[in-house]
Amino acid sequence: GYFFVLGEAGIGKTALAMHIATKNAFVSHFADVPGGELPTAARKSIAAQVIQRYGLEQFLRNGCLLPSAGDRAHLSKALTVASQQLVAAGNNEKLVLVIDGADQVKSDITSDVSTPVGLPAVLPEQVFAFVTCRSGVDFSAVREPTQFYQLESFDIRNLADMEGFLVKLESLDARGPNLRERLISRCAGNWMHLRYLIEEIEAGVRNTEEIDGLPRSLTQ
């Protein structure tokens, strides 16, 4: 099935996806890598990882990917064969695909709705997709089982994480009173905004006295 993590830009979706993919060595695709927004490149990347991991040599020619490696049908077949291997093994192992920034991957179909990077609407048995994207993206072609989780910038847990992160930055200690509290207030729970501000402060190009007058949104 599919598990979607939704949220505004800068809320931490990519960091979460990277942590999950790296910690668990999951198959992954990140749309912000060069060319990562192209659906054929995304599918080819995912297919290559699945083929290598499960030794699916029937999807190779002379050790190389087939010209059709970026096609929707090709990836669907590769996932199906990998699923069959997992089911036959009987050890309950899962094939998890981590796809970050699915909203940035261009759709290559003419219908109004699509699936993340053109994955099957229904994933094979023991295959799961962890997908991050901005709120409001229409992936209604995806069939159940599907779960959604909304990341909110003002979630008390998000603000607590931000506070904990800032406490560890000893370089902020000598840069003015209540700087950490002011950064949290101004960034409004947005990690990308916080990152840019800290970089500017530490580089000496941002006066801490200016913080309270800055926009609270990256789009303002």
Image: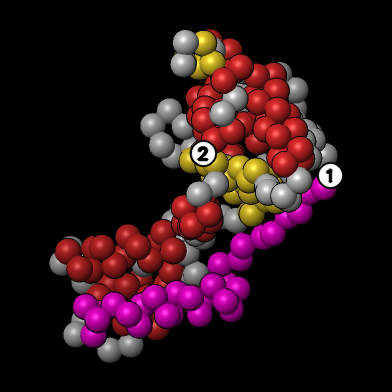
The x, y position of residue 150, in whole percent, is: 67, 60
Query: What amino acid type is highlighted by mark number 2?
Result: His
Please tell me whether residue 188 is drawn above or below residue 95 in the rendered image: below
Query: Position of 166 compared to 145: left or right?
Result: left
The CA distance from mark 1 to mark 2 is 22 Å
Q: Is residue 82 visible?
A: yes
Judged from the image, the secondary structure of the residue bearing numbered disc 2 is strand
Q: Is residue 11 above or below residue 67?
A: below
Pointer 2: what residue? 29
- Inspect the magenta stretch and tell me whether residue 160 lies in it: yes
Q: Residue 213 location in percent, x, y?
A: 35, 71
Whole-percent x and y of residue 115? 70, 33
Q: How is the image coloured?
A: secondary structure
Whether 40 is among the magenta residues is no
Q: Nearer the viewer, residue 16 or 8?
A: 16
The answer to which image quadrant residue 95 occupies is: top right
| Residue matched to label 1 | 144
> Is residue 172 positioned above or below 96 on the image?
below
Residue in view at x 58 percent, y 72 percent: 154
**Residue 66 sits in which quadrant?**
top right
Type of the residue with mark 1? Glu
Between 93 and 47, the one nearer to me in the picture: 93
Q: Residues within 10 Å of mark 1 (few under 14, many from 20)?
A: few
